[in-house]
Amino acid sequence: MIESEQNRVIKIFHGPQHPGITGNMSVELDLVGETIQKARTHIGYLHRGFEKLVERRTIIQAFTIVCRICVPEPDPNEENFARAIEGLAGIEISERAKYIRVMVLEMSRLSAQMLWMGGQSGSVGLGTVAQWSIYDRDLILDLFEELTGGRVYHMYIYPGGVRRELPDGFLDRLTQFLDYLERRLPKYDNILFDNSTFKKRAIGVGVINPDEALKYGYVGQALRGCGIKRDVRKDNPYLVYDKLDFDIPTFEGGDVYARALVRRQEIKESIKILRQVIADMPTEGDIMQKIPKHRKFKIPKNDILVSCESARGEFNYYMAGDGTEKIRRMQVKGPSLIHGFTLLEKMLEGEELSNVAMIMNSLGICPPEIER
Amino acid sequence: MIDSLSKQYEIEDKGNRLFKIRINQNEFLRTINFIGSSSNFITLSQIACSDWIEDEVFILNYILTTDRRDKNLMIELEISREQSKLPTLLHIFPQAEVMERDLHEMYGIDFIGNLTLYDFALEDWNEIPPLRREFDTLAYVNEHFEFRAGREDNKDVKAETKRRRAEAKKLKAKKEAKK
Amino acid sequence: MKFSIDIKGTIAPFSAIARVFEHPQTICYPSQKKEKVDGYRGFHTNLLETCIGCANCQDVCMNDAIDMITITEEKNPKNNSACIPRIDYGRCCWCSLCTDVCPPSSLKLESESIWANEDSNNFLYMPKDK
């Protein structure tokens, strides 16, 4: 803490060791009393150098490390990587593999929303919600364990399809879990979304101006909480999302409460999508296309941009190949790059110190994907 | 808007609602201003850079997207690896500030007008910008870190197979000679 | 959106008390153990009767975690190099690419995931022969 004689400005570091931070980053705050004058984000505690690591590995070797770029929700990374390689190499995957991929992505979205609920309520002081939602997330991780072999890092969505066949009875167990989750949602309403404590803290805090939101590149709930309906699954559809029937929820207000309500609706929409996928999944078709052996799998000299909707917003991958079996460049841009810097530093000016954790959780800032 | 842009520029359609324009470095600001004002590609979504050391250029792709977020336009330009300078887009798109800071740290590109080109992810980094192709990560690791002992008994399988085959041949020849 | 106090929002959170009377969901390890799941990517096993010592696993591992070491007792006459894999668990990421490329499918992953050793610097694991 540094106190200046003239202005009584105190500078503190909110993080990187702080339970109110969504990950491992720090925000340098200049305070007068409890009001923030200026905020600056600092990252660099989690830099693992994925973009350089991928340049020394062949494509199949690189596929196994890509999922570690984002910790709460690894599957959009695998999906983007696989789709970029398939786009460059000209591989078409089967309908069955597409439906299985959509199922895995939606399950991953549900588990990320459960984790968000725990973080958001913990930052406001409602610890009970975190205990409940982490248990419900554990049931999803049990399903992932029997499908893919791993609970958090699945390494399942492969360039060419998916890696394993569904176990016997998996779709029945998934349906049972969805029924259970639908019964639990009204209880979450009672303790979180309709709770007066949460509403008093969250309404009117962390407001985003809708006029500049589109131009400044905000994505995900930052837009949908201001009433702007944008979602990659509807605007730029991929896999089989153009055949599925679902809605994009929006709420007016642009504050923390509006974004929380958007996420609550998205949980219901994800359950709706999963039920349609279970009903419509083709029973025949290869899950995996034949691809060359790993030292002979070459991609032509070209570049491509792919994007995918993760639980927090639009996730982009730029990939360039150079005719060899190694990737020339893979550049990852997650939703938190703009939200964590441009949006956060602007939003925190004039806010109170106790609201910082709540705002960071509501924007869903994930440091692993900012600094890869 | 793609039709209106195609009168001025040659547009490559890469499929899946992705388009590309190639321009020269000196037309850069003029192109960005023109596209921003006369089409609905209003947001800067990403600045992607790749290093083509064999051609001695960096290839930068400025990726713009529409207000409906349904199409993407890649503006590709080449800049020299030795004198890599470009004007900043900070005043048109505030989100460019952090993207340019990232590229400055990883490639060493200077963005004129951006005053925030300090550390982004690396701290006290004294070597060359790490994403350049001439930076060898394996050499850096071998120089700065020690490996744990215990793995010295690793064998090269091809050499072992050859050696065993040669020994087996020798043994067979000896036996025949004895007979 | 404006905040206004409402009865439901003030009283409804107390419904959480009903959960106090439910059975807790945590597993009391070690007296209770977690059910092992088929197909979980745990530790390696290598059937030495079929392992041919081709080092495909060493070639595909991108973390350089696999060493090929000379076998002490020959189990498979077709193993021309007389070498079998040993894995460094300080580097392995359990991606199971090594099991995908094994030609006789002798290298597999079992559901076991607990290994205790007195030496804290020892990460080298010899796959079980089964």
Image (tube, rainbow, N blue to C red):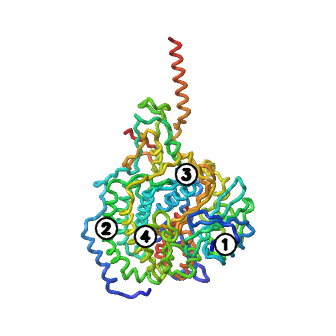
Q: Which residue is mark 2?
A: A179
Which chain letter goes with mark 2? A
The amino acid pointed to by label 4 is Trp
| Place of residue B28 in the rendered image (x, y in percent of width and height, measured from the top left) | 71, 70
Q: Nearer the viewer, mark 1 or mark 3?
A: 1
Q: CA distance from mark 2 to mark 1?
A: 51 Å
| Place of residue A293 in the rendered image (x, y in percent of width and height, measured from the top left) | 53, 45
Secondary structure under the numbered disc 1 in the rendered image? helix
Please determine if labels 3 and 4 lie on a single subunit.
Answer: yes
Q: CA distance from mark 1 to mark 4?
A: 42 Å
Label 1: few (<14), some (14–19) or many (≥20) C-alpha neighbours in 10 Å: some
Q: Which residue is mark 1?
A: B5
| Place of residue B179 in the rendered image (x, y in percent of width and height, measured from the top left) | 50, 11
Label 4: few (<14), some (14–19) or many (≥20) C-alpha neighbours in 10 Å: many
Q: Which residue is mark 4?
A: A116
**For residue C10, what is the image quadrant?**
bottom left
The amino acid pointed to by label 2 is Asp
